[in-house]
Image (cartoon, coloured by chain):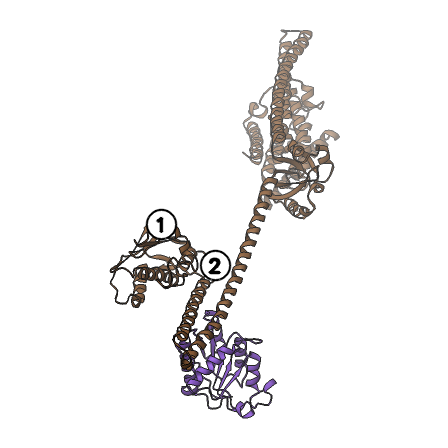
Amino acid sequence: MTSQRVADFLAIAAAGIGVMVLVGWLTDNAILTSIDPSCISMKPNTAVCMILIAMAVVLVRRSPVAWRVTARVICGVVAAMALLTIGQYVKHADFGVDRLLYHAGGPEPYTVYPGRMSPVASILFLAVSAAVGAMGTRCGARVTKLAWPFCMIVTTTLMIGYVFGSVSLVSLSSDTPISLPALLAFTMLGVAIFAVHPDRSLLSALNPSTPGGLLWRGLLIPALLVLVVVGWLRVQAEMAGLIDMRFGVALFTVLVGAFIVVLAGRTAMTLNRMDAERERIAAERDRYFSSSLDLVCVADLNGRFLRVNPAWGRTLGFSDDELLSRPFMDFIHPDDREKTIAAYDSPAQGHEVTALENRYRRKDGTYVWLNWNATAPTGPDRLIYAAARDVTEQKTHEEHRRALTAALEHSVEEARAANKELEAFSYSVSHDLRAPLRAIDGFARILTSEHASQLDTEGHRLLDVVRENSGRMGQLIDDLLQFSRLGRKDIEPRTVDMTALVHRTVERLRPDMGDRKIALHLHPLPPASGDAALLEVVWTNLLSNAIKYTRPRAEAQIEVSGEIVDGHRVYRVRDNGVGFDMQYAQKLFGVFQRLHPATEFEGTGVGLALVQRILHRHGGRVWVDAKPDQGAVFEFELPTEGGVHAVPV
Amino acid sequence: MPSQSEMTHVEVLLVEDNPYDAELTIRALKQHNLANHLHHVTDGVEALEFLTGSGRYSGRAPVVVPRVVLLDLKLPKLDGAEVLRRMRADDRLKHIPVVILTSSREEQDLVKTYALGANSYVVKPVEFGDFTSAVAELGMYWLLLNQPPATPSRGATAQPAMARAGSGAF
């Protein structure tokens, strides 16, 4: 239930009392008009005023303007009625307002003015109508703040008067006391006015979890109740003649004192318990703060530390006083200040700082890298709560790694440049080598054809040797060119049908086989991922080798097979040719390396080097198994996918 | 310095810095009677001077342009590609057929010179027999078979044609 609904409820209850009294007057029922028929009754005009002012309390807080205006008019009417009544008392006059609703004749008990509102009620009506009239205006809360304690103090005092049966207290030395129903109704109105503008600080003071609230609720309020109850009992007992006045005072003092001692003791124990708990929590927080391995601190927006934990001293070597005496910017590496200010400005705009890295100076002049997390400024003092971690070691590793990477990149770049230079060199040398060869071959030929008569048989043979060697050198240069060109060519991996590729290559090599008897066993092969043109070079070399080195066999056997092993594609060319000694196997794949004299088997020694280079560029490899005179098995392997080197190396 | 009359009847301009390559080329053309009106220059600058009648050839009136220019790529001073580029940028020379005669088998040279407007690209074979027949075939094609534009300085554009000369040609 909100405090506004409490206000409405209490106002309606006060109006209910007014209605009850009016009904009492109409039915001549003294219980309804005065609750206790031995006491003074609540007058009809007081009852009407009570109903009106209670309506005003409800209406003044509703949104339609007409209702609010109506409420303020009602306040005016009630205030006017109260003022007229007070005027009558002061001037000892009769303005006729008392008999507007009251027509009963005869004297009334406790008053010389039958039908007249009591002076206390008039004053309370003035206070209440002022408070209600001010509601919703700028000074509403301030007027309320004055009105409700006034109501409560007056009504409480008079209530105690009723409890003790003190007529002089109830009438406040005037001729006419306030009636019991009016007193109850005003108490309700007082609380209702408080509920309209509740005083937060007062409410929080009553909160039992605070020491203040505990004092109020545990000690002061019960003590007041005890005072009233014990006092009432004492008065009753004295009036009944059970005890005399001295005994009454003694009994009152002992009882009230005992109650207060018990209440105070209980309250003190609770307070002590609360304090101990608070201290335990604070100690725990302090322990957490001071034993944290992270560098924890509290800083203000002026750029100073307010509190640092011992981890700071351990990490930086400065004492707490040294750290707190200077702006923390003094400890930050000059190169990192700008980014720190930028990050520090960002929490000032309501943002948190996360993963900020900067360097803090240690007492020995070296720097540590700190990684920061900080709250946005919080609390009434706009403080920043931050924690940092020493990440110097990670940073050093990181820098080391970065330097290594840079060095590596540099050497890769150098290697690439050297490679490029080498390619350019071999390109240009190969071309320049061709021109003299052409001249040697050309002029030797001219010599044989145009000056034949001047040469004997030996002269012709020698010229043929010259021409044969220049032709061989031309072939070497062509092979070397192809080999060097491979280093520059980009590989475009595609799915290659290896079975079809092998068949095509065999058809192309058919002229080399002549009319030899060759048994070719071509098994289906798994497809490969690679550059089809380059893979064709691989097959060409391996197959032409097989054809070449089986030449001494009466029936050559050449078998091509392949399968997928552990995700790798393996291909195989097996022949029953002359084979070789495995101790020379590694030599086989070097440029210009040959195991057979060119007079026996022609060739330049580039083919297998080319094969190996192509397979390396594809992320694959090639190996061989052979025995002298028992044939050779060449096998190569290609990765399934993604094994192709993107960069030419 | 050749005489003025020789200058006016040039049908083949050979741009070649290697004297032995030049000799072999001329010899191959002579065998087929194709070198009667041949002029040989040894660098790119001289080639352009000859064609435009400037510098060493300032006396030459370039009335009759060669029927074909045999151009090596690797040349002193100005290389073959640059000579070709300047010829194609010159209104008087852009219709002259140019055959690249080179040792280079490089794809990039091939692509570059065709892009610059070469009419043919021939790789010089090392073997003399192949070389002789290649030169002879391309000489015959450009001097005997190919029809040049009626007015070489303006009019119809010479169609780029590729001579498949011998096994060494691309």
Q: Residue at x 46, y 61 (%)?
A: A487
Q: Which residue is mark 1?
A: A567
Q: Nearer the viewer, residue A143 or A521?
A: A521
Asked whether, in this view, residue A106 is left or right of residue A526, the answer is right
Q: Position of residue A527 (x, y in %)?
A: 33, 57
Indicate the amino acid at tag 2.
Pro
Q: Is residue A39 visible?
A: no
Q: Position of residue A242 (x, y in %)?
A: 62, 6
Mark 1–mark 2 Cα distance, whole angstroms, equals 24 Å
Q: Position of residue A250 (x, y in %)?
A: 68, 8
Height in image: A607 above or below B43? above
Q: Are marks 1 and 2 in contact (CB under 8 Å)?
A: no
Query: Can you tell which chain is drawn purple?
Result: B
Task: Tell me the SS state at disc 2.
Answer: loop
Report which colour depicts chain A: brown
Asked whether, in this view, residue A390 is left or right of residue A423, the answer is right
Q: Residue at x 74, y 36 (%)?
A: A325
Height in image: A605 above or below A93? below
Q: Position of residue A131 (x, y in %)?
A: 66, 36
Q: Which quadrant, please, contains the N terminus of chain A? A: top right
Q: Residue A374's quadrant in the figure? A: top right
Q: Residue A350's quadrant in the figure? A: top right
Asked whether, in this view, residue A29 is left or right of residue A568, the answer is right
Residue B68: image tag = none
Q: Which residue is mark 2?
A: A648
Height in image: A414 above or below B66? above
Task: Tell me the SS state at disc 1.
Answer: loop
